[in-house]
Image: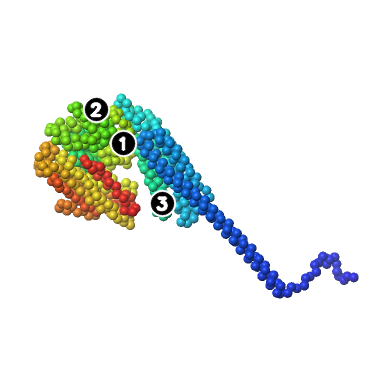
Amino acid sequence: MTHPGWGSDWDGQPVPEAPQHPETVRRRRTSYVRERRRRTVHRVLLGCGLALLVVVGLGVWLVTDALRAAGALEAARADVKDLQAQVTAGDSAAADKTLVQLQAHSSTAARSTRGPAWTLAGVLPWVGPNVRAVHTVADAVDDLAQNALPSLMQATTLVDPAALAPVDGRVDLRPLQDAAPAIVAADDSVQLTAQRLEDLDTSSLLALVAEPVETLRDQVADVAVTTATAARAALLVPAMMGAEGPRNYLVLVQNNAEQRATGGIPGSVLLLHADAGAVTVVGERAGGSLSGLAEPALPLTDAENALFGTLLGTDMRDVTFTPDFPRSGALAKAIWEQKVGGTIDGVLSMDPVALGLVLKATGPVALSDGSTLGGDDAAQTLLNQVYLDIEDPQEQDAFFSDTSRSVFSAVVGGQGDAPAVMGALAEAARQGRLMVWSADEDEQASLAPTVLGGALRGVDGDSPVIGVYLNDGTQAKVGYYLDLTVDAEATECRPDGSQIVHAVVTLAYDAPADAAELPSYLVGLDDIVPLGDIRTNVLIYAPDGGGIESVRVKPEPQGLNAQLHDGLGVGARTFTLKPGESGTLDLQIVTGRKQTGNVHIRTTPTARQKGDVVLGSACEK
């Protein structure tokens, strides 16, 4: 029987359990906690194991890729070096094969530095900068190999040096004009790649990463110099050779036996006419016949008057007193137009050493007197022997002009191996013995930064430029026996990025002991210095924003004459030396602020010294 208050709602109620003993509750809780901890530890261990496997896997993946990329980049580095040599030599067949190899190696390197492992590693501290540097290099080299170099190779095939050799006195300019857009576009791409690599900060990278990155960066920078030169040539050469109308040029043949800042006295001046690729020598004058103007052909600055005198602008033989060749070119143009007439569109300059380099490529040339002149004896013959063998100054000038005309005729006539001739001209430019100035402002803007420009400057990018120049004061040809050496070292990098350069400039006069007995035209006039002695003015140009901190002079007295030329500090000193004597300037020179690059020392090329010197930076040691 049921209670009357019970209803159906009660039917499903569970029977209450009896209360559990407290000890039982504690034990069950302990067991639960332990089980939960065990499961948590298990999950943590499992997670750590999986994470470790992922890290190890990514690490192995990264290392494997890195080794593959390193091998490919090393192979690409060798390919770039070979390719540059083959293109320079004109070996297009070998260059094509090397380009295919380079593309394969660069593609391997680029693929090997992509993917999740590299993305993850790139954001990690310490490892990240190294990973990103390798990726940047691989990507940049691949872009260079796949995009820039093929079009450049195709363009250079069209302008093979052999194809540019004159035929019947004329160069076919059409291939170069057709190739110019591709060459310029390729150079733009190469310059961007070179800048990407230049922007990499390798100072914080591991040595095993930094060293190959820097090596490859330097190689690409060399390629960039080559392509920049090619691009300028593709744009400049057709117009300057008369593709757009006839041009007239002067060629100053500088005589290093009577020194001037950029080489020597322009003893002979040739007039070239260029028209649609045909270049001919149409006239010549002795330098002495282009003198005697009552006033400078162009106004001279106060600094020019102080350093060089009015002859800089009144006498063709003295326009090279200034180390700024564009200024020499403008003055030469003005003097010729006043003395001779006509319009001059540009000025070139060469010296007998440069002529000798060219003659080694063209082979000997025949002179009007029936003799021949070759590359091995050109400099000695033109700078010294002619004065020993020929007494009449007019006959000396005629011999000099005849030789210069013959060499230029051989070059424009296509004599010799074209690539070798171009190589000789390039070497002459690197030695400071070949310079070019254009009266066209746009053309000159392209020429000025190159080795052909010869412009006076105190800084080049972040590299300070020091100048050491000679100007003869003897009015003789004994400068052939004068040797110039510059022993220098960048000794200190200061906190503001300037450098201290210690330089010892030495003039050694190696004339015969009996120099006074040499022919009178060679030793000059005895009312300037005793016969057989030499007098030379030395000009030291400090870098832009820098100066000469101290100088010790041998022989006495001490001191320099200080001037300011085109914003650059100049120290000037005159030496008078007897045969066998020498003079030295021991200098401490400070560069401008933030000039942390290698130090360039530009010097007057002499009969035996090549000219410019490059010193390692004290800020990058």
Q: Quadrant of residue 526?
A: top left
**Residue 423 numbered tag:** 1
**544 or 121, nearer to the observer:** 121
The amino acid type, in three-letter code, at marker 1 is: Gly
List the residue tagged with mark 3. 210
Q: Label 2's element?
A: strand
**Label 1's element?**
helix
In the displayed structure, would residue 449 be above or below residue 419? below
Question: As drawn, which residue projects farthest toward the bottom?
Answer: 22
Name the spot of residue 206 as percent of width and height, x first. 42, 54
Q: Is residue 136 visible?
A: no
User: Can residue 186 be seen from the camera position used here?
Assistant: yes
Camera-side mark, 2 or 1: 1
Q: Secondary structure at mark 3?
A: helix
Q: What is the quadrant of the C terminus in the image?
A: bottom left
Amino acid bearing label 3 = Ala
Q: Name the image quarter holding residue 237.
A: top left
Q: How far apart are labels 1 and 3 at the CA level?
A: 34 Å
**Mark 2 or 1, nearer chain start:** 2
Image spot of residue 564 (x, y percent): 23, 48
Neighbourhood count class around disc 1 (C-alpha, 10 Å): few under 14, some 14–19, many 20 upward: some
Image disc number at residue 57: none
Q: Residue at x 61, y 63 (%)?
A: 41
Label 3 to label 2: alpha-carbon separation: 56 Å
Mark 2 and mark 1 in contact? Answer it, CB < 8 Å: no
Q: Amino acid at mark 2?
A: Val
| Residue annotated with mark 2 | 282
